[in-house]
Image (tube, coloured by chain):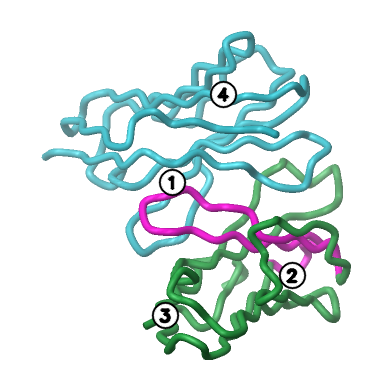
Chain colours: A green, B cyan
Amino acid sequence: DTGVSQDPRHKITKRGQNVTFRCDPISEHNRLYWYRQTLGQGPEFLTYFQNEAQLEKSRLLSDRFSAERPKGSFSTLEIQRTEQGDSAMYLCASSPLNSHTNTGELFFGEGSRLTVL
Amino acid sequence: AQTVTQSQPEMSVQEAETVTLSCTYDTSESDYYLFWYKQPPSRQMILVIRQEAYKQQNATENRFSVNFQKAAKSFSLKISDSQLGDAAMYFCAYRRRAGNMLTFGGGTRLMVKP
């Protein structure tokens, strides 16, 4: 499977615990995005990487959230001291940088669902 | 800031019939992309159709077509010959051509009745 993969698919945690999600983008894609989606809503942008550089962060990304893409390949999204309001689906997406292959489309993974008790 | 609005939280269509999902957006840009994504239950989001703003011709992909009205900032999706597998959440999305991210609408849940 050469699509975007995310792990774990579902995480249940207690309030105050830390959680980490991993995303493996499509291999030739330079751009990687994290979105958050709450039930019945559209995805909201969290952050964006071009290769290893984090170029944009949403105001939604509080200081408890940190994202990395250390080698420009996979990315991790860590949430520290989780709160019940963090319960959501965390979506990862990737896209190519090359203008010849970039149709503007994002390719999404299946998401990591977080439930904070 | 760009915003995308989907005014229909839910729509229902009879199998084999046609349904139109609405989307409006707000932008001051002239060059951008518009997309419709489909998200089946517990499945990943997949692209249905895309439109480039500089193209006047409406995009078509098999049973899916759009009505792109640039001046009105409207971008509706028409699904012809609806099938049970079309049941899903549908999201309209916008991206500046020079931008880096998609802005999504709130979604429309489409139900297909057999």
How many C-alpha atoms fall within 10 Å of the one at disc 4: few (<14), some, or many (≥20)?
Answer: some
- Which residue is under mark 4? B59
Q: Are marks 3 and 4 in contact (CB under 8 Å)?
A: no
Q: Position of residue A97 (x, y in %)?
A: 84, 53
Tell me the SS state at disc 3.
strand
Whole-angstrom CA distance, mark 2 to mark 4, is: 29 Å
Circle 4: residue type:
Ala
Closer to the eye: label 1 or 3: 3
- Which residue is under mark 2? A27
Whole-angstrom CA distance, mark 3 to mark 2, is: 31 Å
Q: On what subunit does the disc labeled 3 rest?
A: A
- Which residue is under mark 1? B38
Does the magenta-highlighted stretch encompass residue A63? no
Tell me the SS state at disc 1.
strand
- Which residue is under mark 3? A116
Does the magenta-highlighted stretch encompass residue A36? yes
Closer to the eye: label 3 or 2: 3
Closer to the eye: label 1 or 4: 1
Q: Position of residue B111 (x, y in %)?
A: 22, 41
